Amino acid sequence: MLTLEMLEKMLLAAAVELEEKSKMLCELDSVAGDGDHGVTIARMAESMKNKVEAHDSDNIKDLLDDLSMAFMNSNGGSAGPLWGTVFGGLADAAPEDAKEVSLEELHAMLAQAKEDFEDISKAKIGDKTMVDALYPALEAGMAAEGDAKAVFAAMGKAAAEGAEKTADMVARFGRAKNVGERSLGTKDPGATSISILLTAMAAAI
């Protein structure tokens, strides 16, 4: 289904894509934030690349745990802790010492990631946050059948669609809500970075 080797390949591809899009993410963030989201994401992408290439995690659970900790320790903004929570949730439900997970196990991992995220964030769909891409993606993945390619293709598509929709939203959560109507017409940077992550992972399979 999803092997450690596949996951490593997907994460490396995502790291490259995130680094390449970091300037664009900073530009999006400059509308309602400090303009440094892309800097934080690039730092996290570098951590992702280093963790994968080190090959010091010999199973899926450990790799996801290691990435969660690396993101949690990233400096700058809320992206690190938020991504860390998602990856930590995936790790929590991953089977011990497994180099491969089944469709059923992957569904459970996605469900745990959503549950863990909901425990720390009060943001809802429509608030113009990363949730607008993250929740539809996790739900699409949980509903998808077939192989890993089908699951991540569904997640990438849902995340991309969710991120696009944020351009028509007025920010209602976090610091971005302070700019009000000025947030219209621009995609949310957090939702966009989640979209980049998942579409790149899907494309790498």
Image (cartoon, helix red, strand yellow):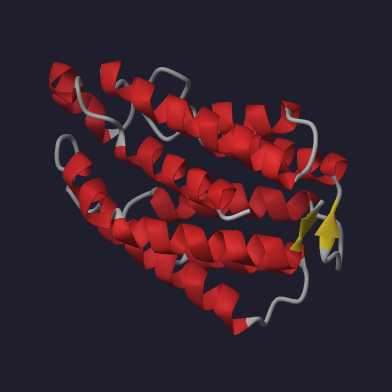
Is residue 205 among the parts visible in the rendering? yes
Q: Is residue 44 above or below residue 177?
A: below
At a point 86% along the width and 68% down the height, the residue shown is 97
Left or right position of 99 against 112: right
Most foreground residue, 18 or 47: 18
Left or right position of 79 against 64: left
At a point 56% along the width and 79% down the height, the residue shown is 53
Left or right position of 77 against 109: left
Q: Is residue 165 above or below residue 49?
A: above
Q: Is residue 192 above or below residue 17?
A: above
Residue 115 rendering spot, x and y as whole percentages: 67, 35
Residue 157 rendering spot, x and y as whole percentages: 53, 31
Counting every numbered tag in the picture gives: 0
Is residue 65 among the parts visible in the rendering? no
Q: Quadrant of residue 153?
A: top right
Q: Quadrant of residue 149?
A: top right
Left or right position of 18 against 85: left
Residue 169 rendering spot, x and y as whole percentages: 29, 17
At a point 63% along the width and 41% down the height, the residue shown is 152
Most foreground residue, 70 or 41: 41
Residue 119 rendering spot, x and y as whole percentages: 60, 35
Q: Is residue 95 above or below residue 139?
A: below
